[in-house]
Image (spheres, grey):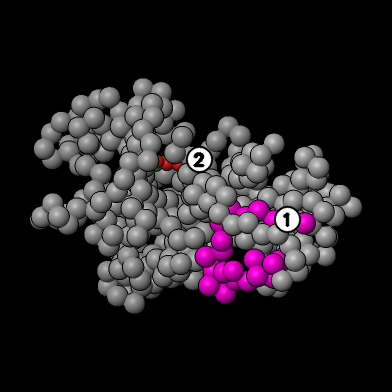
Amino acid sequence: MTDEKYMKLAIELAANTKGQTSPNPLVGAVVVKDNQIVGIGAHLKAGQAHAEVHAINMAGEKAKGATVYVTLEPCSHFGKTPPCADLLIKSGVKRVVIASTDPNPLVAGKGIAKLKEAGIDVEVGLLQKEADELNEVFFHYMSTGLPYVTIKTATSLDGKIATATLESKWITSQEARLDAHTYRHQHDAILVGVNTILKDDPELTTRLPQGGKNPIRIILDTSLRTPLSANVVNDKAAPTWIVVGCNAEREKVAAMEEKQVEIIQMPTEKIDIPTLLKILAEKGITSLFVEGGAQVNGSFIKAKAVQQVITYIAPKIIGGESAPTSFGGEGIEKLSEALELEIKSVEKIGPDLKIVAKRKST
Ligand SMILES: Nc1c(/N=C/[C@@H](O)[C@H](O)[C@H](O)COP(=O)(O)O)[nH]c(=O)[nH]c1=O
Ligand SMILES: [Zn+2]
């Protein structure tokens, strides 16, 4: 098998733990000796063993003189677990092939330097593009200190998210709605505006046939209009945080806290998205799934606080100039101010279309 084939396996191992490792990166490792795979591993959960540890443990004695393929530069600092670079040196591997270098300024290049000093043959950059894409959330969070934001919209062919009388259930198909739940599993938190709570009383949980992690539920609700009877307040299916302005009534705040809802009070009357993102990042949110509605989506676009937009389009025409579209707010005047993205994929999901678009990497 060529180097590429082993690195593809390591990337595959990492890709399959998506949604499990946050706030840590996705990492896969494969140990090969005399053209035989003698150990494989992936980082499974933050705080637990790194991918290299699982793979080297599985290889045992066979690690001596072996080649290790790892999707991210081995760590060289004492985090929750001892450094992988030291483990690789101790286990006597001969060669280490790395896809991505670590973006964390504290570690970048240190792991590679340690391995080279120990006389290990190190090669960097094999399938780096695929491996970097895998960790776009982790790299974004490390380099900006802010959560990676995905906005999901679901519209008719003519771009409406509801009729003029605000009926919206359902525009897209069951298959498309189910597909969106994969992103709920993969993101640390899901965010909607209070209008969605008042209109749909949603659960905002991950209901995939194969199961999945429920994201933390974040509600933007400046004057705390979320009813105490709402699903997200009572079902205890996941933590619920409600973001309010500084003028939210103290009694309402107290009543919500009584029900174990966490209230995030902004220092300003209105909710400022960039300030909110900093607060969420400090609370460990590395990825945020924004499911609208139009007003909330509009505020994220205005703040240019989005990395990925996922649009589901149903082959239906709703019409009506007052029927709402995906992005509310005042919008832009000049086309040159439009948020530029690039389309990454277009696919059919049941009768609907799914378009994934991403911000051009700056
Ligand atoms: N109206 C539609 C959607 N609407 C999305 C949100 O407005 C819903 O309140 C939210 O998905 C409900 O979450 P739940 O209670 O956890 O199921 N989303 C879609 O993909 N297609 C639609 O046609
Ligand atoms: Zn490590």
Q: In what element is the residue under mark 1? A: strand
Percent coordinates x, y for residue 226 in the rendering: 37, 56
Residue under the image location 76 percent in, 45 percent down: 32
Percent coordinates x, y for residue 353 in the rendering: 34, 29
Mark 2: amino acid: Thr
Percent coordinates x, y for residue 97 in the rendering: 65, 53
Side of 145 where 226 appears, left or right: left
Work out whether residue 236 or residue 97 is closer to the camera in this orientation and state it: 97
Percent coordinates x, y for residue 195 in the rendering: 30, 50
Work out whether residue 47 or residue 105 is closer to the camera in this orientation and state it: 105
In magenta, the rendered stretch is 94-116
Mark 1: amino acid: Arg
Residue under the image location 38 percent in, 67 percent down: 276
Q: Which residue is mark 1?
A: 95
Q: Is mark 2 within 8 Å of ligand 1?
A: no
Q: Which residue is mark 2?
A: 182
Residue under the image location 31 percent in, 45 percent down: 342
